[in-house]
């Protein structure tokens, strides 16, 4: 904005209309002015006297003493300007200058008094000053503007080249100004009104050209934009679009129904599966509040771990919600419909439940068949008898998971004890698997015990078969008649005990097993070790808890309670009502050696009850057993049992001897001579015993 005050000259002179022409001439001379302003007594402008007016008066013959009245231009003919006049732009001043026919124009204040004068020269000076200012501004703009600007004249010579153009085109304005634009940007067509693409090094440039003025065209302005970044962004947008279309395809092929929900709880995307489920199109779903479609949306989105059953379009479905955590704050989430057709699923679940019940029923039945029938309480014995001690050891054995070795003649109740230990242990609900080591054919033993993989050998079941160890996993395996186990199998058993894993026949992997082992035999295992028929290391592994069961002839006090127990058992099974056995039979029973032990006694009672006729069982009912006993006092069976007795005694002595030797060796820090001395035996006899017991020396 340009103020008139800034342009005007305040060196003015005023004169009264009563003053003379001579006085006026003096004023002109003293002030070197071209015009003076005529004012009234109050100083108000009433006219203007120019040098021309004075010359005209003198030429008319007026005297110097004549007043100036009638010589000057009256106020109504004077062109004057008010002091507060403003010009908003240069062109206004320019127009005024072009149209003004006077050389000097008085400037008056609001009261009408002259305060200055504006000459044409003043206006031209102000005009030039303003032009300079404008030029400086344009120059500064050109310098900082992030756009390349080139000006060319009507001969296509560059007149302006700003800094951004320099950087973009890799040129120096000092070198290009004055040059033909075609030399610098040959690809440009100045007459085209469309953006033109130019490449310079790695930059992509968009150039537009516009004429400076149309008629006549006196040059062009070329504007250059750096489009490299825009091009990169366009490529990125393109790849985002591609990604979006891939994601849409993935979402639409997903089985799960999916809704993407924004932070305001509004649906922003729905996949095809959800469209089908809700029978609504994406367009209908997008923009709707999620809670209008999924009634429980608020509760699901708050508790994200929850799965809710929701009715969608009359169908039950399981829905869940996953928040999207791309941004620092949660920005919406995805609602998934995991299962639909829940009614069908419910049928499957019902079927599954039915199968579960059947499975548990068959498990129970199997347990009854395979499982343990006896507990410690079912082991009948007289209080404080020898067997009470054995029962106590068995009960202690049940508390831990150490391997147990049960030794006893046939029919003494070894299996009964194995059952009882398992039943009293923490594994009572787990499987109890019995293996009769004497009954398995050697060639099948390995696959029976460890199972086999599908197609492991000719004749093998197609789907393979789990072995006894795998079946007993978590529970107890009862290895009956362990003394009859083939040596080769003994090594494998030892590996299972040591590594706690099994190798399936024909398989490649090992299976870890957690098994408690109870072994039983009526053989002298130490003797078998000595004869190299049983592995010593295996013997020590299974003989952790030793449970010797005395034969019935060694605990005659148990005969009576056993007879009573079997009587009530078979009375009830066979629907009889026998009162008992006569005292003479009991006495005979006590004398009898019972080579078949409790099994024999049990069978005798069962047979007598089946066949007996009176209410008491008499001698006659047991004649076959008792007479045989009388006839065969020195029978082979008795001999066998005597042998067994001897064996047990021998075994116990040998065990003690072996333990003594080990103890002495430990005491003497492995020094054999000292150990022999400590035991009070000769060195040679000591070495013999070491050999006999197969004691390994360091
Ligand atoms: N103390 C007891 N109380 C009640 N019944 C017993 C007792 N001991 C053994 N029996 C019964 O005697 C029979 C034989 O017992 P078991 O089969 O346990 O003997 P075993 O020593 O394992 O015989 P084997 O060595 O021949 O396999 C079983 O029917 C068992 O119920």
Image (cartoon, rainbow, N blue to C red):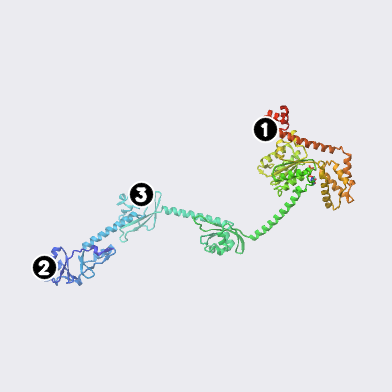
Label 1 vs 3, first from the N-terminus: 3
Task: Tell me the quarter of the picture where residue 418 sits.
Answer: top right
Residue pushed farthest front? Answer: 384
**In the image, is 550 to the left or to the right of 58?**
right
Q: What element carries label 3?
A: loop
In the visual, does 679 lie left or right of 566? left
Q: Residues within 10 Å of mark 2 (few under 14, many from 20)?
A: some
Helix, strand or loop at label 2? It is helix
Pointer 2 and pointer 3: residues touching (CB < 8 Å)? no
Tell me if residue 374 can be seen: no
Q: Marks 1 and 3: which is nearer the front?
A: 1
Mark linked to residue 22: 2
**Ligand 1 sits in which quadrant?**
top right
Pointer 1: what residue?
667
Which residue lies at the image location 83% right of the left edge and 52% below the top edge?
A: 572
Which residue is under mark 3?
Answer: 170
Q: In this view, does 2 lie above or below 454?
A: below
Secondary element at tag 1: helix
Q: Residues within 10 Å of mark 3 (few under 14, many from 20)?
A: few
């Amino acid at each position: 904005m340009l103020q008139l005050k800034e342009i005007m000259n305040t060196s003015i002179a005023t004169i009264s209309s009563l003053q003379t022409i001579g006085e006026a001439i003096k004023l002109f001379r003293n002030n070197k002015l071209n015009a003076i302003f005529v004012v009234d007594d109050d100083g108000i402008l009433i006219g203007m006297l120019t040098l021309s007016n004075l010359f005209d008066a003198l030429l008319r013959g007026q005297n110097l003493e004549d007043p100036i009245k009638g010589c000057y231009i009256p106020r109504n003919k004077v062109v004057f300007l008010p002091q507060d006049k403003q010009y908003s732009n240069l062109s206004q001043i320019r127009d005024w200058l072009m149209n003004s026919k006077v050389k000097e124009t008085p400037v008056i204040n609001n009261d009408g008094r002259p305060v200055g004068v504006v000459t044409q020269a003043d206006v031209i000076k102000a005009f030039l000053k303003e032009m300079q200012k404008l030029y400086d501004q344009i120059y500064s703009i050109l310098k900082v503007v992030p756009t390349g600007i080139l000006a060319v004249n009507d001969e296509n010579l560059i007149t302006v080249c700003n800094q951004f153009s320099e950087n973009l085109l890799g040129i120096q304005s000092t070198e290009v100004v004055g040059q033909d634009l075609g030399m610098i940007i040959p690809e440009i067509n100045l007459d085209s009104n469309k953006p033109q693409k130019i490449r310079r090094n790695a930059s992509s440039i968009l150039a537009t050209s516009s004429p400076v003025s149309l008629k006549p065209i006196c040059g062009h302005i070329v504007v250059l934009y750096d489009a490299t970044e825009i091009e990169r962004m366009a490529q990125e947008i393109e790849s985002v679009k591609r990604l979006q279309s891939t994601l849409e395809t993935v979402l639409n092929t997903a089985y799960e129904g999916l809704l993407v929900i924004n932070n305001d709880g509004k649906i922003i995307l729905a996949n095809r599966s959800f469209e089908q489920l809700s029978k609504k199109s994406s367009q209908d779903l997008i923009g709707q509040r999620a809670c209008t479609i999924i009634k429980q949306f608020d509760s699901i989105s708050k508790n994200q771990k929850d799965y809710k059953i929701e009715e969608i379009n009359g169908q039950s479905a399981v829905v869940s919600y996953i928040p999207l955590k791309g941004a620092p704050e949660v920005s919406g989430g995805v609602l998934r419909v995991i299962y639909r057709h829940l009614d069908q699923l419910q049928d499957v679940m019902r079927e599954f439940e039915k199968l579960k019940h059947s499975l548990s029923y068959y498990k129970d039945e199997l347990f009854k068949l395979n499982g343990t029938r006896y507990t410690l309480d079912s082991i009948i014995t007289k209080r404080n008898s020898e067997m009470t001690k054995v029962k106590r050891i068995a009960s202690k054995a049940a508390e831990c998971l150490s391997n147990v070795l049960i030794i006893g003649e046939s029919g003494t109740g070894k299996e009964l004890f194995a059952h009882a230990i398992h039943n009293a242990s923490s594994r009572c609900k787990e499987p109890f698997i019995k293996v009769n080591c004497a009954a398995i054919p050697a060639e099948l033993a390995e696959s029976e015990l460890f199972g086999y993989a599908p197609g492991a050998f000719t004749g093998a079941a197609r789907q393979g078969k789990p072995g006894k160890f795998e079946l007993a996993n978590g529970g107890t395996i009862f290895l009956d008649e362990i003394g009859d186990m083939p040596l080769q199998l003994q090594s494998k058993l030892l590996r299972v005990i040591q590594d706690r894993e099994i190798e399936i026949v024909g398989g490649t992997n090992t299976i870890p097993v957690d098994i408690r082992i109870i072994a039983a035999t009526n053989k002298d295992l130490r003797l078998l070790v000595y004869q190299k028929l049983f592995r010593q290391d295996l013997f020590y592994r299974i003989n952790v808890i030793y449970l010797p069961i005395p034969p019935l002839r060694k605990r005659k006090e148990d005969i009576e309670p056993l007879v009573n127990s079997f009587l009530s058992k078979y009375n009830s099974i066979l629907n009889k009502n026998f009162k008992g056995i006569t005292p003479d039979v009991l006495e005979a029973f006590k004398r009898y050696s019972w080579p078949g032990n409790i099994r024999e006694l049990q069978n005798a009672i069962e047979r007598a009850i089946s066949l007996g006729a009176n209410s008491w069982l008499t001698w006659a009912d047991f004649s076959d057993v008792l007479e045989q006993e009388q006839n065969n006092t020195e029978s082979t069976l008795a001999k066998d049992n005597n042998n067994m007795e001897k064996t047990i005694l021998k075994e116990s002595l040998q065990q003690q001897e072996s333990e003594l030797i080990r103890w002495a060796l430990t005491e003497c820090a492995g020094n054999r001579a000292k150990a022999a001395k400590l035991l009070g035996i000769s060195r040679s006899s000591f070495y013999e015993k070491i050999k006999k017991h197969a004691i390994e020396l360091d």
